[in-house]
């Protein structure tokens, strides 16, 4: 990550009304497009190096530890989803199905596991 490109991208976005943290990991700045009022918090990652670009709509917020990676047309295939879910479950996370909305999944660490008493 080139520090000067990173700094210039952040300053341009702040001038345009977007809030991008200096601690956010941004790869391929020239391929990232933000709508009006976007926020990218510290420790969020946007990787646009493997695609034609990553575009965000208006007033999108990326919280800490969010990861966005561009791909072919920005679509994740079934194999990629399966691998991501398997990795999260293997690390002890569970999916909160009551919060799923528009293909956004909410993972959390349960307070007790099914094999251990609560």
Image (cartoon, rainbow, N blue to C red):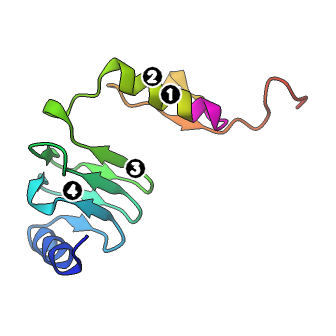
Distance between mark 3 and mark 1 Cα atoms: 15 Å
Distance between mark 4 and mark 2 Cα atoms: 29 Å
Residue 59, percent from left and from top: 21, 50
Which mark identifies residue 48? Answer: none
Compared with residue 90, is residue 44 higher up or lower down, i.e. above or below?
Answer: below
Distance between mark 4 and mark 3 Cα atoms: 14 Å
Mark 4 or 1: the one toward you: 1
Crowd class of label 3 (few under 14; some 14 to 19; many from 20; radius 10 Å): some
Q: Which residue is the site of mark 4?
A: 38
Residue 62, percent from left and from top: 33, 52
Label 2–label 1 contact, CB within 8 A:
yes
Callout count = 4
Residue in view at x 18 percent, y 64 percent: 18
Residue 73, percent from left and from top: 13, 31
Comparing 33 with 84, the one in front is 84
Q: Quadrant of the C terminus?
A: top right
Q: Is residue 30 left or right of residue 70?
A: left
Q: Which residue is the site of mark 2?
A: 82
Q: Dividing the picture into quarters, in which one does residue 74 lie?
A: top left
Distance between mark 4 and mark 1 Cα atoms: 27 Å
Q: Is residue 1 magenta?
A: no
Region rendered in magenta:
88-93
**Of helix, strand and loop, which one carries label 1?**
helix
Q: Earlier in the sequence, mark 4 or mark 3?
A: 4
Which mark identifies residue 85? Answer: 1
Q: Which residue is the site of mark 3?
A: 66
């Amino acid at each position: 990550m080139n520090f000067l490109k990173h700094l210039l991208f952040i300053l341009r976005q702040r001038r345009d009304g977007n809030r991008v943290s200096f601690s956010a990991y941004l790869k391929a700045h020239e391929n990232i497009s933000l709508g009006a009022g976007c926020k990218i918090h510290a420790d969020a990652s946007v990787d646009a190096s493997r695609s034609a670009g990553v575009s965000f709509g208006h007033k999108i917020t990326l919280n800490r530890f969010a990861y966005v990676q561009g791909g072919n047309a920005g679509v994740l295939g079934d194999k990629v989803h399966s691998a991501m879910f398997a990795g999260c479950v293997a690390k002890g996370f569970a999916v909160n199905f009551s919060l799923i909305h528009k293909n956004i999944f909410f993972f959390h660490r349960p307070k007790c596991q099914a094999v251990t008493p609560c």
